[in-house]
Image (cartoon, rainbow, N blue to C red):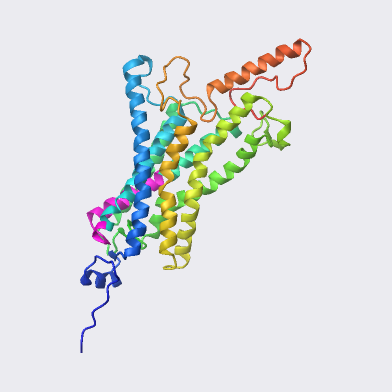
Amino acid sequence: MATITPTIHPGMICTVEEFMRSITDTSIRCLTRGESLGLTAVTASALLSLLAVLYAMSIILRGVVWRFRHVREVRLHIFHQPMDLLIFCLFVADILQATGAVMDIKWIHTGKVEVGTFCNAQGIVQQLGETGVAMTTLLISLFTFFGIWMGKDIRSMALTSTVVGAVWSFIILMVVLGNVINRGQDVHFQAPTPYWCWISEGYLQWRIWGEYIWFWITLIVSTVIYVPLYFWSRGNIQIDDRAWWKFSFQRAGNSAVDPALKGVRRRALIMLIYPLVYCVSILPLSIIRWITFVNKGSESGTATFIILFIYGLSGACNVVLFLTTRPNTALFGRVVAEGYAAGRAPSLLSEDRQSIRDNANANEEETEAGQEKEGSEDIPLGRLPSR
């Protein structure tokens, strides 16, 4: 009986033996020409994000070197406010996430994704980066919400450092435990999934608790937080200064007449754009993952590559957002120690508070002189103004 030789798809680099093995063996995946092109596009977007974040980090490093040389008072303080530390951690996670995607260059070159040392390394870097981006974005959302809505002015860098340290310790612990406990098992822990290496489908619980759950928590929490704070920034919601759980609705035209207060609300809304960017990039990816959970093998390769291309640009979007909205912060600029408060609330700068207080004092003086003006109350430092 004649042996039937399988036909390899046009453009495949795999040998006949490797292609035959990939049919029944999940430890190897031969890429078609279309899959290689899709992976190339994903790698290009990740490379763009990697270069953008590295550029931002070089600016941060330049500012740190300048301060160490010229400002003695802040030589030991790289970060001066909680949001600086959180943004820096977000950039670090963006670098890891982008690096994991750029490592796909090897699979494009060889035409196959296969288990091994490089595969394990890519899976580890991917999990560190993607989970790090998700959890750091969650912290940015929560810090912004605490400062605006609840009036919890988080000024302590020690507290912020502790929270950030706990988050990254958890991420590293999950990565280490997953790779150590499942070493030597019949099913590889890191394997083709299928266009790159990550936690294989035989370890669903590790996928969920090591990464997926944080995607979904960040997505839900950021959405729930963004909606009310968006309407607060427009002046539609007024928060009670004495009880954060009490608020009322009003027409936007009846509030926020103070230009300084408008500036505060705009700055607060800007800090929520980071979670919004993440939600826009992660929502389609989460839908694809859920479809895969329910109906295995039903995902579309083209749709997956398009979504991952968009997701890969999240790092570049974060850099563009930061450079256009916060270019003069201590994290980027050459800030001297004088007049710079260490650990101010993440969404309200000290100049905003001073401007509001100055306007309030001016209004009080005019009221005493017989001129009727609104908004003359002093704004407590413990809460962002809601009126």
Foreground pick, 122 / 153: 122
Q: Can residue 106 be seen in this snapshot?
A: yes
Quarter where residue 21 is shown: bottom left
Number of callouts:
0
Residue beneath the point at 41% across and 27% down: 331
Q: In this image, 375 relative to 125: left or right?
A: right
Residue at the far front: name it.
10
Residue beneath the point at 48% across and 60% down: 290
Query: Residue at (71%, 14%) from the top-left corner?
Result: 364
Foreground: 198 or 271? 271
Is residue 116 shown in magenta? yes
Q: Nearer the viewer, residue 192 or 301?
A: 301
Where does the image place residue 194, in percent across and percent down from the top left? 34, 62
Residue range of the region highlighted in magenta in the rendering: 109-132
Left or right of 57 in this view: 218: right
Quadrant of the drawing holding the C terminus? top right
* Percent of width and height locating residue 363: 70, 16
Q: Is residue 125 left or right of residue 384?
A: left
In the depicted structure, whether residue 291 falls above or below residue 348: below
Classify the position of the N terminus by image quarter: bottom left
Question: Visible in this render: residue 174?
Answer: no
Judge whether residue 295 is colored magenta: no
Q: Name the spot of residue 335 as percent of width and height, x first.
A: 42, 20
Q: Is residue 68 above or below residue 173?
A: above
The secondary structure that dominates the magenta segment is: helix
Task: Name the side, left or right, on which 28 lies relative to 133.
Answer: left
Residue 80 at x, y percent in the picture? 43, 24
